[in-house]
Image (cartoon, coloured by chain):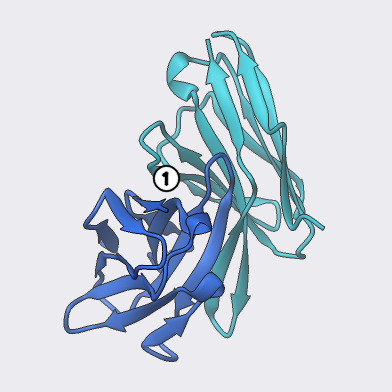
Chain colours: A blue, B cyan
Amino acid sequence: AQSVTQLDSHVSVSEGTPVLLRCNYSSSYSPSLFWYVQHPNKGLQLLLKYTSAATLVKGINGFEAEFKKSETSFHLTKPSAHMSDAAEYFCVVNTGFQKLVFGTGTRLLVSP
Amino acid sequence: DTAVSQTPKYLVTQMGNDKSIKCEQNLGHDTMYWYKQDSKKFLKIMFSYNNKELIINETVPNRFSPKSPDKAHLNLHINSLELGDSAVYFCASRTMTRNQETQYFGPGTRLLVL
């Protein structure tokens, strides 16, 4: 069965420093993977998605993620954190049966 | 213009009551979903409809009944509300482009059962 594991429940960074949010996936075939962001009391917004076209995927707000099959990882990165990046981030895999399976989320805290 | 909208945004009610949450999408998508996000932020799919037909029904109590009057709307009716139903409920709609799907989520309905 397809699943994702987000390795950190919380990540704290200072404004202007790099962000790394880790995600490992489990899939019996080449998966479709997504990162969604949820700001406090807001809905879910799609940041980026991997659909096998390119292993390095660029998303909105300066985020990008790299699909590494050898490591079964799809980590989310950003070179320089901004205060507005503070939110909950979800790594998501498409099971192939029209269902998305969500990771448990990583809360990103950004300090001035 | 909001692509996926939900009403109400907040809902506070007593145990035992019956309530409905509405969802509308103006994206022209055929498939819509309901998800539940619990207090630990864990999101899980509840239902999926394609062109007004139920296609996914996870193990959700039958007190929860989705209704799709047309493919742009998917409402969720909950009977005999229980404390454990308190959660954020998200509606989503799905697009398929070159066999790749993307789901777009509504802003959520925060349900509190007292």
Residue extending farthest to the left is A70
Would you say A16 lies left or right of B48 here? left
Q: Residue at x 42, y 45 (%)?
A: B44
Q: Residue at x 74, y 58 (%)?
A: B3
Disc 1: host chain: B
Q: Is residue B108 visible?
A: yes
Q: Position of residue B70 (x, y in %)?
A: 79, 50
Residue extending farthest to the bottom is A54
Residue B74: quadrant of the picture? top right
Rate crowding at label 1 as few (under 14), some (14 to 19) or many (20 or more) other CA atoms within 10 Å.
some
Residue extending farthest to the right is B1
Residue A21: quadrant of the picture? bottom left
Q: Is residue B60 above or below residue A111?
A: above
The quadrant of the image that shows the N terminus of chain B is bottom right
A102 or A77, which lies in front? A77
Number of numbered discs overlaid on the protein picture: 1
Name the residue carrying label 1: B44
Q: Is residue B101 above or below residue B43?
A: below
A98 or A71, which lies in front? A71
Q: Position of residue B77 (x, y in %)?
A: 64, 28
Residue extending farthest to the front is A112
Q: Is residue B64 above or below residue A28?
A: above
Q: Is residue B54 visible?
A: no
Q: Position of residue A31 (x, y in %)?
A: 35, 75
Would you say B68 lies left or right of A108 here? right
Q: Position of residue B71 (x, y in %)?
A: 75, 55
Q: Secondary structure at mark 1?
A: strand
Q: Is residue B99 above or below residue B53?
A: below
Task: Residue type at mark 1: give it.
Answer: Lys
Q: Residue at x 68, y 33 (%)?
A: B9
Would you say B52 lies left or right of B101 here? right
B31 or B93, which lies in front? B93
